[in-house]
Image: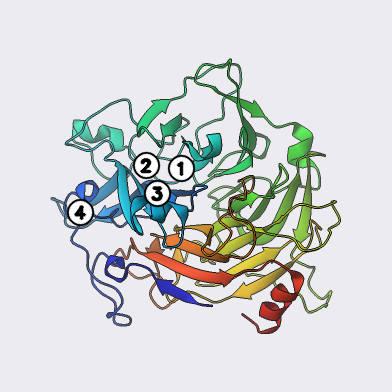
């Protein structure tokens, strides 16, 4: 079990190669970054979602193009790509693993206006059993001002728009505003699947606590087919709750709620804190439960990830052997990778952690999995069950091939830190990295990895 680069020639950094790892990092001459035919360009703060066939979709994002005229300029991306990993149904249908571009985006050569503009810090999720991708919010940093000759990042250009992307027909559609409820503009938030027809949204930079939690639900009578609902005040405040927060990680718990980890509490003020707390939203009771970390000095030998912001996270369905305290069903684990542990000074992480809930109990535990070769933040991660056997990866998916299979995690893109401390040079990636985790379908197997210190 260990990390490996799926596409070696796609590992890339932009800027001067560092003194260490020069054989791994390669300069990628981007040019018109969104018109590359073979694969998506380097980027970070993009979105990535997994589909039932084992593939994943990457959309939008950002990097700083130091080759642009005038000494460099931000590159706001709006293209959309799908990757089919080897051993998945998607790869069989596609004729092998690799990238396929789904949409060129809003480029200078394709100035369609009914498209989501280039942005970063947005969120995305999959609905309609993998037929539709939802995209919300983010910031375009004043990208819309380019026609007026204004370049560079401009504050105050956060977004609150909601879009659907028809993955089969490759068509974007804006969801019109409707009803009395609509979330405020935000970025660096999360969007988590509650069911195929409902999603939880949480947080965002400088979003107040009482505006943090929203629910997006399918409504055939609503204009555009979707409707926002503000969560009750009790759901926000009970047990303290995560409160005002951004740059956190969140995934579905497989039972209509969600798990939320880390991020930065408060707003951009120096009084805010990077944290490593783990919360569970119980959707049946609409209450938050704090799962940890354990209080200092309590003992027990529990291991716990350190504080971090901008980590990548994914839910991993783990077939259950035997019963649980909730009466059955598969467990859903939280997989966390990378992130930055210090703000404002950036110190990146390359650790991989798995929270195993143990039969639905809130008394779960963390397992330390292999670290990746390069520390990264503002990247993305998804999981899939690859052949032979099971392909169920997302909570709520149909189990199309039960029994066996290997759980694999895939990361894409992000911002690098060389030697765990960010240096100047704009180090970005567009590689696909893979970690084979193993079957992980019973407690004996989990304990075997845990005892090995992996």
Looking at the rendered structure, which numbered label has been put on residue 58?
3
Return the residue nearer the eye: 176 or 19.
Answer: 176
Q: Is residue 182 above or below residue 410?
A: above
The answer to which of marks 1 and 4 sits earlier in the sequence is 4
**Element type at marker 2?**
loop
Marks 4, 2: nearer the viewer = 2
From the top left corner, tell me how far across and down residue 8 is, in percent. 31, 71
For the residues labelled 3 and 1, say whether their Cβ atoms are less than 8 Å apart: no
Q: Which residue is mark 1?
A: 122
Quadrant in the picture for the C terminus = bottom right
Mark sitting earlier along the chain (3/1): 3
Residue 396 appears in which quarter of the rendering? top right
Q: Nearer the viewer, mark 3 or mark 4?
A: 3
Disc 1 to disc 2, C-alpha distance: 7 Å
Judging depth in this view, the residue of 235 and 175 nearest the camera is 175
Horizontal side of residue 136 vs 72, given as left or right? right
Q: Pointers 2 and 3 in contact (CB under 8 A)?
A: no
On the image, the x and y values in percent for residue 245 come to 61, 48
Q: Of callouts 3 and 4, which one flags the residue occurring earlier in the amino acid sequence?
A: 3
Q: Quadrant of the N terminus?
A: bottom right
| Residue furthest to the left | 69
Which quadrant of the view contains residue 390?
bottom right
Give the number of the mark in front: 2 or 3.
3
Q: Nearer the viewer, mark 3 or mark 1?
A: 3
């Amino acid at each position: 079990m260990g990390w490996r680069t799926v596409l070696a020639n796609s590992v890339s950094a932009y800027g001067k190669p560092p003194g260490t790892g020069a054989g791994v990092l390669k300069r990628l001459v981007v040019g018109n970054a969104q018109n590359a035919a073979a694969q998506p360009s380097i980027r970070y703060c993009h979105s990535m979602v997994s589909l039932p066939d084992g593939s994943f979709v990457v959309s939008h994002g950002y990097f700083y193009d130091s080759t642009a005229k005038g000494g460099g300029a931000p590159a706001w991306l709006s293209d959309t790509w799908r990757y089919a990993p080897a051993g998945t149904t998607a790869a069989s249908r596609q004729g092998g693993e690799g990238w396929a571009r789904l949409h060129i985006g809003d480029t200078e050569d394709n100035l369609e206006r009914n498209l989501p503009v280039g942005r970063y810090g947005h969120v995305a999720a999959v609905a309609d059993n993998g037929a539709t991708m939802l995209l919300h919010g983010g910031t375009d940093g004043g990208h819309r001002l380019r026609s007026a000759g204004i370049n560079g990042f401009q504050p105050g250009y956060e977004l609150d728009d909601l879009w659907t992307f028809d993955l089969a027909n490759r068509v974007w559609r804006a969801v019109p505003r409707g009803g009395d409820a609509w979330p405020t503009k935000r970025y660096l938030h999360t969007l988590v699947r509650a069911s195929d027809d409902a999603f939880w949204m949480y947080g965002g930079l400088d979003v107040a606590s009482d505006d943090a939690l929203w629910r997006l639900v399918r409504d055939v009578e609503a204009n555009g087919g979707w409707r926002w609902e503000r969560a009750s005040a009790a759901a926000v405040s009970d047990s303290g709750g995560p409160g005002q927060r951004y740059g956190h990680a969140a995934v579905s718990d497989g039972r209509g709620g969600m798990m939320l980890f880390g991020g930065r509490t408060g707003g951009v003020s120096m009084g805010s804190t990077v944290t490593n707390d783990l919360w569970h939203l119980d959707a049946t009771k609409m209450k938050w439960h704090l799962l940890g970390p354990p209080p200092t000095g309590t003992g027990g030998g529990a291991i716990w990830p350190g504080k971090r912001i901008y980590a990548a996270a994914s839910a991993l369905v783990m077939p259950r052997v035997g019963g649980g305290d909730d009466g059955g069903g598969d467990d859903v684990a939280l997989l966390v990778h990378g992130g930055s542990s210090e703000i404002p000074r950036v110190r990146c992480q390359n650790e991989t952690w798995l929270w195993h809930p143990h039969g639905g109990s809130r008394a779960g535990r963390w397992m330390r999995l292999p670290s990746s070769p390069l520390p990264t933040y503002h990247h993305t991660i998804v999981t899939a069950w690859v052949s032979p056997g099971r392909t169920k990866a997302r909570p709520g998916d149909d189990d199309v091939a039960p029994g066996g299979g290997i759980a694999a995690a895939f990361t894409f893109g992000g911002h690098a830190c060389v030697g765990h401390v960010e240096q100047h040079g704009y180090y970005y990636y567009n590689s696909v990295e893979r970690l084979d985790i193993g079957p992980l379908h019973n407690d004996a197997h989990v304990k075997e990895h845990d005892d090995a210190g992996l």
